Image: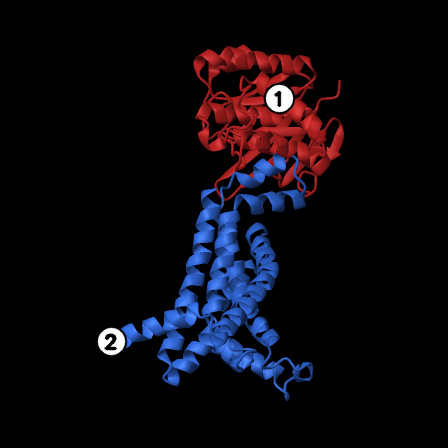
Chain colours: A blue, B red
Amino acid sequence: MDYLYESLISAVTLIFNLDIDVRSAVWTSLYTSSTAIFFASLFGIPTGLWLGLSRFRGRRILVTLLNTLMALPTVVVGLLLFGLLSRQGPLGSWGLLFTPLAMILGQMVLATPIVANLVLAAVTGADRRILPTLLTLGASPLQTVVQLLKEIRFGVMAAIIAGFGRVIAEVGVAMMLGGNIRGVTRTMTTAIALETSKGEFAFGLSLGIILLAVALMVNLGLNFVQQR
Amino acid sequence: MEPIYRLKNIECRLGENFSLKVHQLEIDKHEIHVVSGPNGAGKSTLLRVLALLLKPQQGSFFYSGQPIDPSASNHLSLRRKMTLVEQFPYLIQGDVFSNLAFGLKNRRISRAEQVHRITETLSIVGLDDFSQRSIKELSGGEVQRVALARALVLQPEVLLLDEPTANIDHDSLAGFEQILHSLVKNGMTVIMSTHDPAQAVRLGRNMVRVEGGKVLEA
């Protein structure tokens, strides 16, 4: 018990002393995850809207595929992208492996199906009167989509937050594509894994506390927006 | 005078179990037309076909003498000439003003004109001070009035109303029917459904009877 208590005190001290390694891991995590979720939303939201609003042959297959992609193991994504980005791989000449950009790419692959699927669920679960109402009020196709997005905005926000939660907490992609390089690609999760294995439990705990705080703040932000 | 709507041999199938068939239907301009029939007969479906919200699988459809392919997807300019108020209307999230402004913004009406028209229209439906009221604070009858105002503010050629008096109390009925008469006097065509035979008789020199998915008479 003393061990846990002392580790907790050390972890809190590390946070309040703004330890440089802690700061760097937090910044890398936030930067890569935010960029990844931004681009995942750019692709995922239109995909979810398109699948939710259109009816065509093969739609069910696409939806099933998207559902499957939601459960993609992070190490599998890491492995595939590692193959593509490594020196012998087809994209090896780009020199992206073990850079934050490679991590962003991997996290984007993880988050896009989540965002798309949850936006699709928001569209299909939306009030069925919305579309005819917008059309009868003379909305063009673009005006219809924009207003529909406003009407289902909480579903869309939940989709983005779920995607963010997935990528900020993952280890596989960050480890395999980032390489856990100190000060460059070391994220909170990879640092926790490494430092704990080295016996630096307090350091891992300090990052764990920050990770939880980030999740809490994101959810508080969502609640605040929902209540307005 | 050319009828505003002319439908011939229209069939609109909704799923496996229901289809609306219109052998022939002509609707004259600048009059009130009452669509009557029992619940589930197809009154709402007919109104949605007329509002170009449902696509019939076959038949010919003319609007003001112009042939229209109702199965085509883009009828934006035509849709902007008509507005349907549903029996259970959906109000856009926000306040009453934003609901009334939505269609006007779509048509790129200036902000000053929006405010002028909205104020005037809210007064017509008896909701003078409701502009900033959140839609969450409205009663069922007020929702219906806002939906009516949202349609009227667009000054459409054709106003389609699906059971518009379902949530309006008896005392307000005469006022509502008076509004319809004044709209028609100003050149609008009103097509409304009702399952109240007394109201159908009161309003309807022009009756359209729908039963079992078939438009029986025009």
Q: Residue at x 63, y 31 (%)?
A: B101
Say whether residue B218 is visible. no
Which SS class for mark 2? helix
Farthest residue, direction left: A1
Q: A99 or B167: nearer the eye?
A: A99
Please tell me whether residue A154 is drawn above or below residue A96 in the rendered image: above
Q: Which chain carries label 1?
A: B
Q: B21 or A44: nearer the eye?
A: A44
Position of A183 with respect to B196 (left or right) is: right
- Mark 2 — residue? A2
Q: Quadrant of residue B131?
A: top right
* Residue B109, x across and y down, in percent: 72, 31
- 1 and 2 marks in contact (CB < 8 Å): no
- Mark 1 — residue? B119
Please tell me whether residue B74 is drawn above or below residue A196 in the rendered image: above
Number of callouts = 2
* Residue A203, x across and y down, in percent: 40, 76
- Amino acid type of the residue tagged 1 in the rendering: Thr
Q: A12 or B192: nearer the eye?
A: A12
* Disc number for residue B203: none
* Residue B117, x across and y down, in percent: 66, 23
Farthest residue, direction front: A17
Q: In which quarter of the image is residue A192?
A: bottom left
Disc 2: CA contacts within 10 A as few (<14), some (14-19) or many (>=20): few
- Amino acid type of the residue tagged 2 in the rendering: Asp
Q: A29 or A131: nearer the eye?
A: A29
Q: Which residue is drawn at 39% across and 76% down?
A: A204
Q: In which quarter of the image is residue A80?
A: bottom right
Which SS class for mark 1? helix
* Residue A113, x across and y down, in percent: 53, 64
The answer as to whether the residues below labels 1 and 2 share one chain is no
